[in-house]
Image: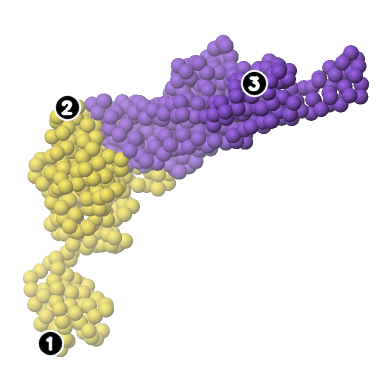
Amino acid sequence: MSIQLYITRLKCLVRNKEAMFWCYLFPILLASCFFFAFNNLWKIEYFDTLPIAYVSEGEESESFEQVLEAAETSEGVKMFDIAYCDEVVAKQLLEKGDIEAYIVGSTKPELYVKGSGLNETIIKSYLDTYRQMSVTVTTILKSNPNAIEEGLIDDVMQHDTYIEAVKDDKKPAELLVYFYALLAFSCIFAANWGLDEVVNIQANLSGRGARVSVSSIPKMKLFLCNILAAFTAHFGSLILLFFYMYFIIKVDFGNNLLYLFAVCMVGSFAGLGMGAFIGVWVKKKAEVKEAILTIATLGGAFLSGMMMPDIKYMVATKFPLLSYINPVNLLTDSMYSLYYYDTYERYYTNTLLLGVIAIIFGILAIVGIRRKNYASI
Amino acid sequence: MVVKVDGLVKRYDKLVALDYLDLQVEEGEIFGLLGPNGSGKTTAINCILSLLKYDKGNIEIFGKPMGPNAYHIKKDIGIIMQNVAVFDELTVYENISYFCSLYIKDREEVKRLTQEAIEFVSLEEFKKFYPKKLSGGLLRRLNIACGIVHKPKLIILDEPTVAVDPQSRNKILEGIKKLNEEGATIIYTSHYMEEVEQICSNIAIIDKGRVIAQGTKDDLKAMISIGEKISMEVFRIEEEALEELRRLPNIYSVEHRENLLEIKSKKGKNNLVSVLEFMQRMNINFGKVITEVPTLNDVFLEITGKELRD
């Protein structure tokens, strides 16, 4: 009987096109927007060694080759991975996309590129700097042949690197906040389904609730069946969102994926509990309940840095208590700590707090639902 | 006795919705609860079902006190609410099956009962339809099927024919009679007196939260002084003639409005004959003549001084 009720409720949920859009499709669309908006930023912030080819012009090229080989960023990342070949091969490599560019000659090195982009700009800038240096050194030596002994050339050659690589292989923290906030917001979106479940079993909120209330099935049993169905459908949406972000747009969530799923699960229950709580205890019309729920979830997402990452830090420093009672923030912070810290202390604290919030909401909702009859319908 | 309500009082702040309401519903009858909108019918039903808290009174169903936890009583009650209460995301079949499974554990039994309910309300062709694709009448029939699918002994129908086309209304009323013939006790609330007259074996007229009259339709009609209503198409009649008409034996009310002469007479023989003789004697031309026995509306009008549909 319970399984049948669970399955039927699950059918109801997955056939609700509006709920499906907001729960399944909308977060994916939002993740895609984030991806397209920030993808270029990531590329700027990253630096990988650039594959190039060098077409030598003989022995006089040797010093230029050494310059190319020695080029590195301030963090010690080698700038160029050089293939030495003739021009025909270099052209083929460029056509195939195996290299970003090829350089011919050394006295007046010529750069050949296939398109225009950040990597091409870096190579060109490097080459321009080299040419400029060569001219400067030649000019100095012409006017002062003792410049080398006087250390003048060393001073001229001293210059700052123009590429700074990120310290490790992780994507920038500020951008990840958006994806964590999205995942967290999707967890808390379960609140809408929690509210629906209450509406469907409360006689004072719907005709269906009245029909259920006069049936011979205990209301708590039905509520638990329905909440479990809502959790199943909602957690499915989280898994789908995660897979989309992780495998399709390649968001790097670190290595603690099981922990991530665990906190999402707790977050989903917290959302369901929050919705059920508002459904039971806000003594207003359904539209008012929905509005309160929207304000609560969107407000939570805003304070957790979904719209502006700086807000998260401002709240954490100026209103720390708010950080600890905002489920969306607890969720993002748990995920963030998984990514950035080697220890799990902060993750456990956040997840535990989130669990406590879920339990409090759940208990209060159940207390309200256990009321058997109403002053008015 | 299937339902016994004693001295039920329900207040919404200062408004008294039920004012010491007493009801007795015997097994096997179709009990009609008739009253204008706002008279307290739905409130009474919600109190009987323990959905609403009430201030005073006792309610017994099947001889046992009714309460929110009385699941042993609830399993034998079917409810069809005024508003259609089904899931838009489930088909006709799935909706009926779902509500059946709130009462019945055995899956095979649920299937059998669901099929029977579908046949009962003649929705075989629509069982794969979603509620939004159904017309108002079909939707009402689905609503009824969801309420009776578990074969309850007591079925409560709260204005099930509101906004329903005549064809579906007849189908619903026939269905209610059939359910009663199969052994179910029915409580039927409505403000449509014709429906109540048509199907109910026992009727309570309710106004301002009180039962103002109760009995069979004949009992109720016998309570009032009107025996016959005669309506005649009369285009012109003098005031003196109307006065003389009022003085005829048994006639106690005469009104002429918009070419229609309406005469109410007390119970007695040959009332129509004496009226027709009078018209002939006075040389008053008249057209169509209709005689009617009093309706429940007349009963309500005489007791409360207002129309049922006011």
Q: Which residue is mark 1?
A: B281
| Residue lying at 16% horizontally and 33% vertically, measured from the top left | B111
Q: What tint does the image give chain A?
A: purple
Mark 3, secondary structure of its residue: strand
- Mark 1 residue crowding within 10 angstroms, few (<14) / some (14–19) / many (20+): few
* Front residue of B134 and A171: A171
Q: Is residue A369 left or right of residue A320?
A: left
| Residue lying at 17% horizontally and 35% vertically, measured from the top left | B150
Q: Chain of mark 2?
A: B
Q: Which residue is mark 3?
A: A80
Q: Is residue B157 left or right of residue A65?
A: left
Check the image and tell me how it is coloured. by chain
Q: Which residue is mark 2?
A: B106
Say which label, 1 or 2, has the lower sequence index: 2
Chain painted in yellow in the figure: B
Q: Residue furthest front?
A: A58
| Residue lying at 48% horizontally and 42% vertically, measured from the top left | A288
Asked whether residue A283 appears in the rendered view, the answer is no
Q: Amino acid at mark 2?
A: Asp
Figure quadrant of residue A140:
top right
Q: Chain of mark 3?
A: A
The image position of residue B79, as x and y in percent, is 23, 41
- Mark 3 residue crowding within 10 angstroms, few (<14) / some (14–19) / many (20+): some
Label 3 – label 1 distance at C-alpha? 126 Å
Q: Amino acid at mark 1?
A: Arg
Mark 1, secondary structure of its residue: helix
The image position of residue A55, as x and y in percent, is 64, 24
Total count of labels: 3
Asked whether residue B106 appears in the rendered view, the answer is yes
Mark 2, secondary structure of its residue: loop
Look at the picture and state if B287 lies above or below B270. below
Figure quadrant of residue B7:
top left
